[in-house]
Image (cartoon, helix red, strand yellow):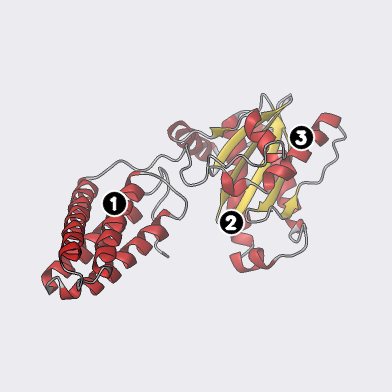
């Protein structure tokens, strides 16, 4: 019989359990699976935001958003679409019920144990699929999973989580393999071309600055550093536009700040229009990074 067996809500930063379903199951293999769940909870930040893994005769599915992770254990024949719809409902209700400040300030495990009532009630609904009335949501989730399928964790990943290969660096840090970005637009292509152009100009001026230093010891070597930092910032923005990474929008704003600072320092070598051009291109590139979100996710207007 396919069914949801257990669910929990944890804080991504440190794996602190915030709430969980009441456990009446005494199955030994299920208890062993829950032990893996504890280790997994502490490493959620290293994985993509939607994953699944098979442990014994059970499937473990989890999602993470806004610093909170939602995990569930179900039988191996339980439909994946229903599993992630269930986690999606938990996520929406938890975000509405508890604010971020309260979540971040929680110290004791299971500080929101009262949320167990909703977990249990929703679990009962999803263990009786015929009683589900969320047909539209199921259709939306089917489309989302088809476009951005959950990442399949392997036994190697589980071994690393449980301490058998502690010195192996996380391969999920930086780029999440299952995060697909929105299609590239014409403004995005234009911004990349302009950003590469600015990076090339900075690199060329930096090389000329080095030649000037070799010929004249009075030249300021800081100009070389400023030119090369500008080049690195422009190219890094192109990378952020092309690939998904954690905090990519924030990183793009930092790169824009670096472009502004380097151009301010180079004000003695560039006129106002050149400085404005470089800063405008950097700002345009940052806007395109912000607009090009993972599939199915709208831009965050609170950035």
Q: Which residue is drawn at 68% across and 47% down?
A: 41
Q: Which residue is drawn at 23% across and 49% down?
A: 192
Residue 21 falls left or right of residue 40 = right
Could you say which is closer to the camera, residue 285 or residue 254?
A: 254
Near mark 2 (Cα within 10 A), the count class, few <14, some 14-19 or many ≥20, is some
For mark 3, what is the residue? 33
Residue most toward the bottom? 268
Above/below status of 91 relative to 255: above
- Disc 3 element: helix
- Disc 1 element: helix
Question: How many numbered circles does the render carry?
Answer: 3
Q: Quadrant of residue 86?
A: top right
Marks 2 and 3, how far apart at CA: 23 Å
**Which percent across, then down, holds residue 54?**
66, 28
Q: Which is closer to the viewer, label 1 or label 3?
A: 1
For mark 2, what is the residue? 67
Near mark 3 (Cα within 10 A), the count class, few <14, some 14-19 or many ≥20, is some
Q: Which is closer to the viewer, label 1 or label 2?
A: 1
Residue 254 falls left or right of residue 217 = right
**Which percent across, then down, holds residue 281?**
21, 60
Which part of the image, by quadrant, shows the C terminus?
Answer: bottom left
Can residue 133 be seen at all in this image of the molecule?
no
Above/below status of 290 relative to 99: above
């Amino acid at each position: 019989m396919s069914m949801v067996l257990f669910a929990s809500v944890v804080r991504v930063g440190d794996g602190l359990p915030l709430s969980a379903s009441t456990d009446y199951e005494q199955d030994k293999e299920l208890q062993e699976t829950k032990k893996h769940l504890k280790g997994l909870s502490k490493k959620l930040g290293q994985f993509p935001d939607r994953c699944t893994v098979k442990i014994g005769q059970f499937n473990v599915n989890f999602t993470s958003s806004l610093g909170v992770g939602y995990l569930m254990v179900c039988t191996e024949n339980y439909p994946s679409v229903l599993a992630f719809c269930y986690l999606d409902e938990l996520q929406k209700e938890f975000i509405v019920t508890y604010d971020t400040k309260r979540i971040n300030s929680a110290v004791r495990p299971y500080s929101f144990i009262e949320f167990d009532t909703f977990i249990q009630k929703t679990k009962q609904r999803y263990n009786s699929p015929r009683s589900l009335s969320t047909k539209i949501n199921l259709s939306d989730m089917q489309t989302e999973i088809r476009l951005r399928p959950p990442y399949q964790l392997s036994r190697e990943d589980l071994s690393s989580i449980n301490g058998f290969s502690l010195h192996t660096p996380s391969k999920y840090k930086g780029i999440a393999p299952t995060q697909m970005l929105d299609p590239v637009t014409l403004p995005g292509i234009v911004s990349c071309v302009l950003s590469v152009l600015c990076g090339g100009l900075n690199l060329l001026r930096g090389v000329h600055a080095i030649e000037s230093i070799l010929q004249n010891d009075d030249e300021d070597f800081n100009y070389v550093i400023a030119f090369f930092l500008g080049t690195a910032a422009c190219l890094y923005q192109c990378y952020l536009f092309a690939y998904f990474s954690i905090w990519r929008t924030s990183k793009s704003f930092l790169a824009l700040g670096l472009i502004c600072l380097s151009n301010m320092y180079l004000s003695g070598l560039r006129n106002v229009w050149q400085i404005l051009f470089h800063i405008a291109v950097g700002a345009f590139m940052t806007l395109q990074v912000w607009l090009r979100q993972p599939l199915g996710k709208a831009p965050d207007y609170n950035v």
